[in-house]
Amino acid sequence: MAVYSYRATTLNGEITEGVIEAVDEKTAIEKLKNSGVIPLRITTPKESLSKRLIFSSGKGDILTFTTELSALLKAGLPLDRSLNILAELSESRVMKGIIHSILQSIREGSTFSDALQRHPRTFPQLYVNMVRAGEAGGVLDVVLEKLREFLESTKELRESLISAMIYPAILMVTGISSIIILLVYVLPKFSAIFSEMGTSLPLPTRLVINFSTVITSYWWLILLLIITGWVTFRNYIRSEAGRYRWDAFKLRLMGEIIKKLETARFTRTLGTLLGSGVPLLQALRNSKGTINNRVIASAIDNVSKDAKEGKGIAAPLSRAEVFPPLAISMIKVGEESGQLDTMLLQVAATYENSLRATMKRFLSLLEPAMILCMALIIGFIVLSMLMAIFSITELPF
């Protein structure tokens, strides 16, 4: 049997912590419920540290808040009492202050969604709209559970993409650092020796030494040009026209990966909103806000117009030609069967798995390509130095 660490609360609002033995996490939760407490957080000892690190971030705080509030409301506690417990429970001073502010707004007569809307940096509009739909339908605990699932799936996808890019990033930094050390520190010493001898050097050696001299002599100018170029580029892509052209270029360069990412993000958001009772047009507006690529986001505008006229979303999405055909077919089946929200979540799960596989294939090609590129550059520098040494000693190369 596994040992689980838990944090729970009694019906009186007292926080308890401890460990419990159980076959799995579900059994551990049932044992805690049967003992008369409300489980808020269940972790294995190995997961505890990593989860604390994740929950220390802003998005992690929202996930923790949503998970624990959902558990308290399901147990039958009123909203104000649940928030009061969470304020005492929160390990983040920022989140503790936000919860106290929300609780104060509710006691002054505001609705929960209106209180959340006063903290837009913490709770996005998507979150607020789902809570408002849950309040209107009297199913706030159900909506919070859907929000928890949405936040967890989003976090898992983001973490898988970040972890996949760690090794290529380390490889690039290491390779570039090695090349800079060779050009700035190693080559100038060799060039001083070669200039004292006054012999004619091979062409590759002269090219490398001249390049090294330019870098060491005009590094400040090169750095200034890089900073100026970066600032200019950032200002350009911040403009609407510049961002659109840059997104169109990225779509041509990495179309498959970007389309799968945006498809998964859009369909999961839309499916979660529809399943929580948010009207279609409002759900489309909020889902569009989660799309980062301007080309794809602009295509969603026409989908919203057609949906407003009662034409559904499958046909407009098909005409927009921004989502994969399989996703369109699945959405069409969902519309015809009256289970659009369920099918949208299925599309999201399909393309999240497909995106992970695509990223794995992409990185399996990128990593050896980066290694080969760095090896060729470093090899050329070293070989040019060896050619100069052999020419000086008059040894055949």
Image (tube, rainbow, N blue to C red):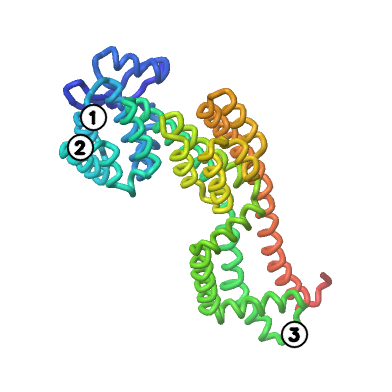
Q: Residue at position x 70%, y 85% from top?
A: 197
Residue 275 showing in the rendered view: yes
Q: Residue furthest top?
A: 34
Q: Residue furthest right?
A: 396
Q: Are marks 1 and 2 in contact (CB under 8 Å)?
A: yes
In the image, 116 versus 75, the foreground residue is: 116
The x and y percentages for residue 100 are 20, 41
The x and y percentages for residue 386 are 73, 70
Label 1 SS: helix
Label 3 SS: loop
Residue at mark 3 to residue at mark 2: CA–CA distance: 85 Å
Q: Earlier in the sequence, mark 1 or mark 3?
A: 1
Q: Is residue 18 left or right of residue 167?
A: left
Label 2 SS: helix
Q: Is residue 159 left or right of residue 91?
A: right
Residue 54's image quarter? Answer: top left
Q: Which residue is mark 1?
A: 79
Q: Which residue is mark 3?
A: 199
Residue at mark 1 to residue at mark 3: CA–CA distance: 85 Å
Q: Is residue 187 left or right of residue 74?
A: right
Give the crowd class for mark 2: few <14, some 14-19, many >=20 residues within 10 Å: some
Residue at mark 1 to residue at mark 2: CA–CA distance: 9 Å
Mark 3 or 2, which is nearer the eye?
A: 2
Q: Amino acid at mark 3?
A: Thr
Q: Residue at position x 68%, y 47% from top?
A: 365
Q: Amino acid at mark 1?
A: Leu
Q: Are marks 1 and 3 in contact (CB under 8 Å)?
A: no
Give the crowd class for mark 3: few <14, some 14-19, many >=20 residues within 10 Å: few
